[in-house]
Image: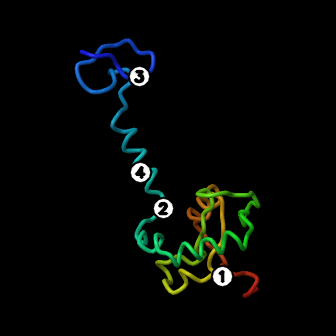
Amino acid sequence: MKYCDFNGCGNKIDRGYYCEDHKRSRKSVLRKRKKKDIYHHDNKQFYNSKPWKNMRSLVYQRERGCCQKCGRFIFGRQAHVHHEIPIKDDPTLKLDENNLKLLCPKCHTDEENKDDKGKIFPSYFG
């Protein structure tokens, strides 16, 4: 017998780390896993490549670290570079500087979940 590892809990347990009061449910663990898979990892190898890291850095410098949608300053991992035309639609544009924009995590989630994409480059096509 040993004590539950939860801070300040005095319940004794036979096995594991936590008592029944502090044990995480299986559903919450699965929910956390699903949350991590928000972004598609079909192109994981591309996102780890040196050309992508260089282009990502270039876009960050071009925008001076500010989100192009809300204008908030973003630093480090919070800076997301978004493809206007997704890689799965046109792989030739994956390293095109004009197809990329810098977004904060909130704006990037909004852009990814937008149903109606509308016009991609409205200033060019009117």
Q: Nearer the viewer, mark 3 or mark 4?
A: 3
Task: Work out whether mark 3 precedes mark 1 in sequence or the reverse, and give the earlier one.
Answer: 3
Instruction: Name the amino acid type tagged 2.
Output: Tyr
Look at mark 2 in the image and give the residue it sits on.
39
Label 4: element kind: helix
In the image, residue 120 above or below residue 44 = below
Q: Position of residue 15 (x, y in %)?
A: 23, 24
Look at mark 4 in the image and give the residue it sits on.
34
Task: Work out whether mark 1 precedes mark 2 in sequence or the reverse, and give the earlier one.
Answer: 2
Label 1 to label 4, Cα distance in Å? 32 Å
Label 1: element kind: helix
Q: Nearer the viewer, mark 3 or mark 2?
A: 3
Q: Position of residue 29 (x, y in %)?
A: 37, 40
For the C terminus, which image quadrant? Answer: bottom right
Near-viewer residue (35 or 43): 43
Label 3 to label 4, Cα distance in Å? 25 Å
Task: Work out whether mark 3 precedes mark 2 in sequence or the reverse, and give the earlier one.
Answer: 3
Look at mark 3 in the image and give the residue it sits on.
6
Label 1 to label 2, Cα distance in Å? 21 Å
Task: Work out whether mark 2 precedes mark 4 in sequence or the reverse, and give the earlier one.
Answer: 4
